[in-house]
Image: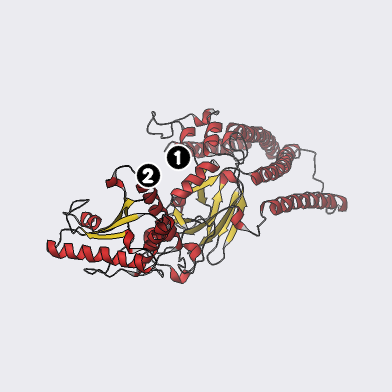
Amino acid sequence: MQLLIVIISVVLLVLIVIQVGKLGEMTTALSSSSAEEAQQTVNSRQGNLMLVFLIGFLGLFIWSALYYKNYYLGFGPNEAASEHGKKIDWLFNVTLVITGIVFFITQVLLFYFAWKYRGRKGHQAQYISHDNKLEIVWTLVPAITMTLLVIGGMDVWNSVMPDVDDPTELVQLEVTGYQFAWDIRYPGADNELGDKNFRLISATNPLGQDWTDKRNLDDFHASEIVLPVGKQVRVRITAKDVLHSFYLPQFRVKMDAVPGMPTYFIFTPTKTTEEYRKELSKYPEFQVPSDPDDPNSDPLWKTANYELACAELCGKGHYSMRRVVKVVSEEEFEKWAKEQPSFYMTNIRGTDEDPYKGQYLEVELKQHAKEYKAQLEKAIEAENPDDKIVRLKYVTFETGSAKLSPLSKYELDEVVATLKEYRHMKIEIAGHTDNTGDADANMALSQRRAEAVQNYLIEHGIDPARLTAKGYGSSRPQASNDTEEGRQENRRTEFKILDL
């Protein structure tokens, strides 16, 4: 509202000045005995006003530049936060100096000539129809200047737009724009982004990732961009619907996001978010409350963030495409990346879209083996006999049966390897059920299941004398049988180390 009042006031002031000028002209014309003298008076007044406007205009221009300098990119606390950004700032500053000099010269000459060559009695304009020397000068000077700027710009562009033969050597991510948000995808531990196909896009697969490409299985999606300081970053940029623009102002990164035509940008962050905030804290402009409606809110510098914005007018919700960008230490980034869950494992695994449904993935088998070995070491080191128990989490049976499921072989093979490593180890294989159904039937079922495991181990070369099979039915619950989760916990197979 205040801005609107100021604008209206300025417009009214201009109208008043115009009307006063017209009134002066009428008064002069009426009071002067000569129309020529009246015109001379008007010309002189207009010429003088041109000089006044020139001084005021250039003065306001210089004042505003100095007053707002700490908000401009490339000045004050807003120095580039990337390696290539310094080159871009240099190019912009060179362009600013050249165009600034031309701007001042042309403005001064424009208004000075309006004053110097105002209409005066006894002076007549001289018309020059052609001057080859003048035309050569004002053609060659801009041409040479533009050539130098273009050459400098191409040199900067080539230095900031290299690609790499092996992108796995740097930090990778993919950003996909759509109305009105960004999908941000990182590669997992393999540091490789999996293939996509727009035909595979669905409610559960927003990017159309091809799950038959195993590189996709550890990729994860993020709500914000997190980058390590000092490491080269390659951003793959694309769009789903209309033209967007991937814009990181503080890093001097801007690249269009075009549907069907992926682009990329490579840059190296040089300043963490905390370092950026610390720099802002040195300037009074950023000491004001971050929330204008709450004078007790944190100062603006303390809540400042790097940001991702869309620099295209892509629709009414264009503003909502802002995303936070965090730059942290390499150690913090590695920790953050390891904590992010795979999109496939949390949203696709075990569903009808999962091409590996009913089978274990290599990463799962490694995790299962790790869990088993951790339990085994703990059981071997335990002094209390009741703690020398290893639960076989991934040994399962067909419903109501003692027939081992095909996937049980992987963990049972771990048990076989254990018994072959510890040649004097003797174990008791225990079967347990929940309390659903008849207790005697549950006891018999648990016994048969324990014997099924025993038989598997014997078939794979383990001496039967080292094995004991015992069914406990529902007599040793580990959780409440009142809930499905508890009953699931109680339906288990485990072995107890009797002797090493």
Q: How is the image coloured?
A: secondary structure
Q: Quadrant of residue 422?
A: bottom left
The amino acid pointed to by label 2 is: Glu
- Looking at this view, is 109 or 59 the one in front? 59
Q: Which mark is residue 381?
A: 2
Outermost residue to the right: 133
Picture coordinates of residue 244 (x, y %)?
Answer: 52, 58
Residue in the picture at 51% in, 45% down? 333
Disc number lying in front (2 or 1): 2
Q: Which residue is mark 1?
A: 4
Horizontally, residue 78 falls left or right of residue 354, namely right
Picture coordinates of residue 340 (x, y %)?
Answer: 43, 51
- Compared to 423, does 126 lie above or below? above
Q: Is residue 473 visible?
A: yes
Regarding mark 2 in the picture, which secondary structure is present there? helix
- Looking at this view, is 80 or 428 the one in front? 428
Categorize mark 2 by other alpha carbons within 10 Å: few (<14), some (14-19), many (20+): few
Q: Earlier in the sequence, mark 2 or mark 1?
A: 1
